[in-house]
Amino acid sequence: MVTTFSCHGHADGSAADRWAVLADYARIARWARQVDHSTLLTEQQQGVGTVRRVQVGRTVLTEHVTGWDDGTALEYDVRASHR
């Protein structure tokens, strides 16, 4: 089963400032309050193919970048991690 969702929010600053936050893919925990910890699982730090592990409480997810349009769009698949 595939679930698709979209997330929209508001952030202050310029578009370049907002993109810099999103492009720092390993550090989602700095701005996403529900994320307790995150780390990259790939040597690659940006772009399609980058994977991060995200922990939200006791739930562990992996997020796989599937689309990256520098400065414009970021798309990724979220998958449950099986420890």
Image (cartoon, grey):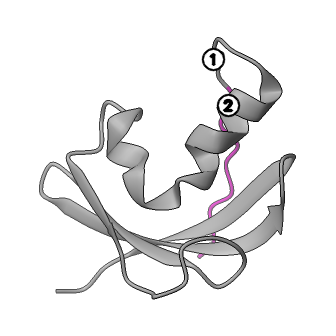
Query: Front-most of 54 and 45?
Result: 45
Determine the residue positioned at 39% across, 51% down: 27
Give the quarter of the image for residue 10.
top right
Q: Position of residue 53 (x, y in %)?
A: 34, 71
Residue 4 part of the magenta segment:
yes
The span from disc 1 to disc 2 (Cα, nearest Å) is 7 Å
Which residue is painted at 53% across and 53% down in the image? 24
Amino acid identity at mark 2: Arg
Identity of the residue furthest to the top in this view? 12
Which numbered disc flags the more N-terminal residue, 1 or 2? 1
- Residue 31 spot, x, y in % from top left: 41, 32
Judge left or right: residue 30 versus residue 22: left
Residue located at (63% from left, 71% from top): 2
Q: Is residue 51 above or below residue 73?
A: below
- Count residues near mark 2 (Cα–Cα under 10 Å), then give few for <14, some for 14-19, many for 20+: some
- Quadrant (top left, top right, bottom left, bottom right) of the N terminus: bottom right
Region in magenta: 1-8
- Residue under label 1, please give it: 11
Residue furthest to the left in view is 58
Q: Which residue lies under the disc numbered 2?
A: 18
* Dot 1 crowding, Cα within 10 Å, few <14, some 14–19, many 20+: few
Q: Tag 2's secondary structure? A: helix
Q: Is disc 1 in contact with disc 2, using a CB cutoff of under 8 Å?
A: yes
Percent across and percent down for residue 48 are: 72, 79
Q: Could one spot residue 42 in this view of the protein? A: yes
Q: Residue 14, how many percent across, how many down?
A: 77, 19
In the image, which disc is placed on residue 52?
none
Question: Which element type, helix, strand or loop, lies under badge 1?
Answer: loop
